[in-house]
Amino acid sequence: MKRLTALQVYGYLPKKNCAKCGEDTCMAFAIKLLEREKKPADCPEFGPGELEKLVEATTPPVRDVVMGGGKSALTLGGEEVMYRHELRFFNPTALMLDVSDLMDDKEIKSRVDLVNNFEFERIGEKLRLDGISIRAASGDAGKFKKAVEIVAREFKGPLVLCSFSPEVLQAGAEAVKGRRPLLYAANAKNWEKMLAIAKEFDCPLAVHSMDLSELGTIAGNISATGFKNLVLDPGIEPNGAGLARTLDNLTQLRKAALHRVEEIRYPLMGSTIPVWQSSKDETQAALYESNLVAMLLDRFLSLIVFHSTEAWSFLTSVVLKQNIYTDPRVEPSTEPKLYEINSPDENSPVFITSNFALTYFNVAGDLENMKFPCYLLVVDTEGLAVTVALAADKLNPSAIKKALKDNKVAEKVKHKKLILPGVLARISGAIEDATGWEVLIGPQDSSMIGSFLKDNWK
């Protein structure tokens, strides 16, 4: 089904241009609805039944499901396309660390601390883990409830509670009443009892079956009751032909959702715990888990539970997640301006670079690490990297001249020397003619700036 246009969404609106939604016109509101920057309920002017029609029309093929609440609320699903380049993906995959109720209190707290404290900055964004999944490996309601209480006391973010026993899961849900954890999981035998618990505690519910037909049947039975806060888990077979079958199943489920097969229109989730249950070598398990999570990120999962606490194992996952969920329609960029690094003065060198985010943060990081006071003039290249900006004529003499003037660089330093990225050597003469500044050709790689300055800057 094709995505609605702004004009089609506009057809569902009151067309009063009252601005009560915060937008000047209904058309502007329609555009914001398509970009998920507004919700249908933000318009107060609907007549009877009109809001429901708009909600149904704008609900994405993969329904969005919210777990948690307040500032820690997490939206799963809500996707409209098979592949990122067709539009974009809207809600990043939630990566959650596994905790078992068989672990002692110290190990549980250690895992909670890891989730609370892990942070890695890349391209100006702080990458973190999203939540904790608590597994009732003991099968004991008391042990499970205690583990949930320990985690809930130390961690305020989203939670997943895991047990196929309704009695055990109810005990866990009571311990975190009001926090709306994802309850895992309903199956062919217990779905009615699990649904009752989910309704009692107002929680989203996961449905599990390795059989896609059975998975759809269970989800359909639950949906028929009017409950649509579901997440589907078709199971993960981590090795050999089973892994190929798993990836194929996930692809089939996404295709079915995009074709609006009602019982399948829900976010998908998976867990790498089978990797650990089938391995005796923890290092090998962590390595394989890292590869498996990457495959699952590429195959449409909205939530992944992993086990390893080795940063090298899950760091690749958070970086891949960032790459997948950037908007392919917009180049990641940083603000074009003059940046002061390591407290420069009037004798400090001036470096030139583009405002492509990855370029800027790499160059700025290298400059900061070498502890040399300098200026970094970031030219507006519309988010293009240096080489690409040169080819597209975005990083040219006139752009550099404008950046120098706009940022009043001549007032900051008493010299008139610019240090260019090595790839700009062929236009260095034109830059000198346009700006009146002397040009020094810097290294191709910013990691070599330190040795370059030692040899070329007095």
Image: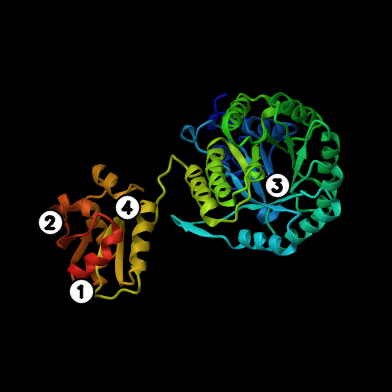
**366 left or right, relative to 126:** left
Which residue is labeled 4 in the image?
380
Q: Above or below — where is 181 with respect to 124?
A: above
Q: Earlier in the sequence, mark 3 or mark 4?
A: 3
Are discs 1 and 2 less than 8 Å apart at CB? Answer: no
What is the spatial separation of the Cα atoms under label 3 and label 2, in whole angstroms?
A: 59 Å
As rendered, which of 178 and 336 lies closer to the eye?
178
Q: Amino acid at mark 1?
A: Lys
First in sequence: mark 4 vs mark 2 = 4
- Residue 175 is situated, as x and y percent measured from the top left of the image, at 82, 56
Q: Is residue 429 left or right of residue 411?
A: left
Q: Which mark is residue 414?
A: 1
N-terminal-most mark, 1 or 2? 1
Q: Which residue is nearer to you in this view: 64 or 368?
A: 368
In primary-sequence order, the first of circles 3 and 2 is 3
In the rendering, which numbered label is found on residue 433? 2
Look at mark 3 in the image and give the residue it sits on: 67
Helix, strand or loop at disc 4? loop
- Neighbours of disc 3 within 10 Å: few (<14), some (14-19), many (20+): many
Of residue 293 and residue 241, the one placed in the foreground of this image is: 241
